[in-house]
Image (cartoon, helix red, strand yellow):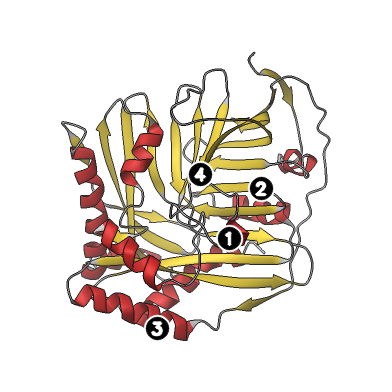
Amino acid sequence: MQYQKTEILLDNPLSFWKHFDKEERVLFYNPLNKELMIGAKRLKTFHKGENFKDYLFVFSSRTFFQTVKDQKWAEFGNETIAFEYYLLKKNGKQTLFYFKDPVEIENLEINDCRHTYKTFTNDYEEWKELFANVAYEISVGNVNKVVISREVKIECDTLVNVESILKNLLEKNPNSYVFAYCKNEKTFLGATPEVLVQKEKENIISYALAGTISRNDQNDEYQKTKLLNDCKNRFEHQIVVDSIANVMKKFASEVIVDETKILTLKNLHHLQTRVACKDNAVLPEWVTRLHPTPALGGNPVHKALEILAKYEKHERGLYAAPIGIMDENGDGIFVAGIRSALVQGNTVYAYSGSGIVGKSVCEDEYLETNNKLRTIIESL
């Protein structure tokens, strides 16, 4: 049985999300084709290797590490799911897809909510300890890069209005991949600039994203030039480019590495390089091959992961982990779950990371994570 469809017109597509407030849901916005997809109500869970024929979209996620201990991440990730209902907004048109039973979606008010909150960011001493341990591992040659992260707890005076946060993320981050996954009254959401891997037929594309500088209203072009010519950032970026290209070379006869460019976001500039090849392996296999890149874990990857498991005190869960959408042919895209947060009740756990190399300065890297946290904090 295939999905049936009907055209609808909602004042705000988030009415669809809000309509299914008691169900498992997913949202994914792709800025490349300006396509917004929202799915609701779990229909099928796929086993490894099972094809997706007749299923319009499937949502797939993996935790950063294979094992998860923190209860707040329980039952999140490591699944591939199809939903019973989908709303697709593209080219100014909204289409409702349903697998069996039609549903009436009404226009619901999506409020702009300004949350009153307290942010617990007194973690610099903990950050210094983590930085020092990683810097030592780099100095003795065990690794040349480790991406360390923070978990920042934010407590709101009221229950968090998820629809309002999503509305803000979509409006304020037009060049990012906005995502949300709601399950068991918890929602993991964010606006990430980072594509882990995408597949269209035999075309495999990944984007190295590493190297960061804040934007400057007075002289933003100077900031771009400064980033492109900064030795520390270029070194950090090249580690990621080389790692992705080397993985691709194991499976493809030709790998194309494009020129490094600037990706401009609301608050930051990043170095970005497109790396591509041709291969017939399924997209989930490419996720396994590439995750985590040195932009998310470090280099060499296995040693960096051992260091993170040893020294990082919080659980990453879906933070910096692969989150993806695939169609019935297996084509699709996986992004990295960064610039993200886990929302539960009136609490927001926001996550932010920074790549540490030999020339990194502890305070500078901490300030960089503060800039990255703005994606979530400004959405509140």
Name the spot of residue 11 as percent of width and height, x first: 76, 39
Disc 1: which residue: 341
Mark 1 vs mark 3, CA separation in Å: 22 Å
Q: Are marks 2 and 3 in contact (CB under 8 Å)?
A: no
Mark 4 vs mark 1, CA separation in Å: 18 Å
Q: Is residue 103 above or below residue 303?
A: above
Q: Residues within 10 Å of mark 1 (few under 14, many from 20)?
A: many
Disc 4: which residue: 78
- Mark 4 or 3: in front is 4
Asked if residue 258 shows in the view, the reply is: no
Disc 2: which residue: 182
Element type at mark 3? helix
Q: Residues within 10 Å of mark 2 (few under 14, many from 20)?
A: many
Name the spot of residue 119 as percent of width and height, x first: 63, 76
Q: Residues within 10 Å of mark 3 (few under 14, many from 20)?
A: some
- At x 34%, y 37%, the residue is 286
- Mark 4 or 1: in front is 4
Mark 2 vs mark 4, CA separation in Å: 14 Å
Point out the tag, 4 or 1, that comes first from the N-terminus. Answer: 4
Disc 3: which residue: 128
